[in-house]
Amino acid sequence: MNVLKIQDIYIYPVKSLGGFRVQKAILENRGFQHDRRWMLVDENDRFLSQRELPQLALFLVSQKDSCFKITFRSNPNSEFDLPFVVDQGENVIVSVWEDSCAAIEYIKGSQWFSEQLDINCKLVYMPDSSIRFVEKEYAHNNEIVSFSDAYPLLLIGQGSLDDLNKKLKIPIGMERFRPNLVVDTDKAFEEDEWKQIQINSIVVTIARPCARCAVPSINPNTAEKEKEPGATLAQFRKRDSTIYFGQNILPKENGTICCGDVVKVIQ
């Protein structure tokens, strides 16, 4: 039996913008440190994503020594330094799907993104004092989450993408599915069978399969909506009119996760 390991770790500081790979990440109560603590909202303080604005895929995010650097493919001469944390600014109540929670507007970021996107929008940060709960139906201990769609972490097995790519005329990268953790599985969709796993010494629970929207069909290099992989996934990963790919997970404790950490299936 092959020993499973963490192959890749990704962090997405701003919801629906590009992410980047790291060698290790600090796991906190609401997910990885810095993951989706920032978000763009519209004039009604409702979240914006690639579903409404595919061009958000063109914003590239990288980490500098003391901040994140954001660049826009459509305007390569313009870049923006985003602090890891802000604690001062206008307090706003923002909405993510059916949830509402407190946030802080970062005026400089609002102005920069409004100019780049040519719309009126705000860039907001989720402070530690803001509490947003995971769906009660799937929570185990009143877990909280950042601006992610619903859960602290998303896990996908490499074997699942490999299986999908065998069915596609043009293979795609894992970035289409925006996972936090990629496990070096050989078996396709092995993670569907997991209920609880241990990463190094950290135990996490599989909450539920991840329901996929149209975002994986948005080309991250062009922001164009494509037929694939949605059309192919619908042929073998669809049930009850929903496509599933990957697993939403709930950590039972905090700690540090590194690439190369052993993954043990407990249940």
Image (cartoon, grey):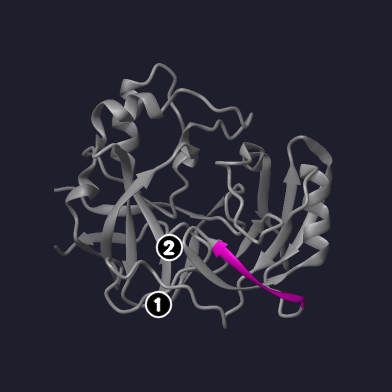
Q: Is residue 243 magenta?
A: no
Crowd class of label 1 (few under 14; some 14 to 19; many from 20; radius 10 Å): some
Amino acid at dot 2? Cys
Residue for badge 1: 254
* Residue at disc 2, secondary structure: strand
Report the amino acid beneath label 1.
Asn
Residue 189 rendering spot, x and y as whole percentages = 24, 41
- Quarter holding residue 202: bottom left
Residue 154 numbered mark, or none: none
Residue at 76%, 43% (x, y): give it.
117
Secondary structure under badge 1? loop
Residue span colored magenta: 89-95
Q: How many marks?
A: 2
Q: Residue at x 21, y 39 (%)?
A: 187
- When the figure is inspected, residue 128 is found, relative to residue 261, above or below; the finding is below
Image coordinates of residue 127 in percent, x first then y, are: 61, 77
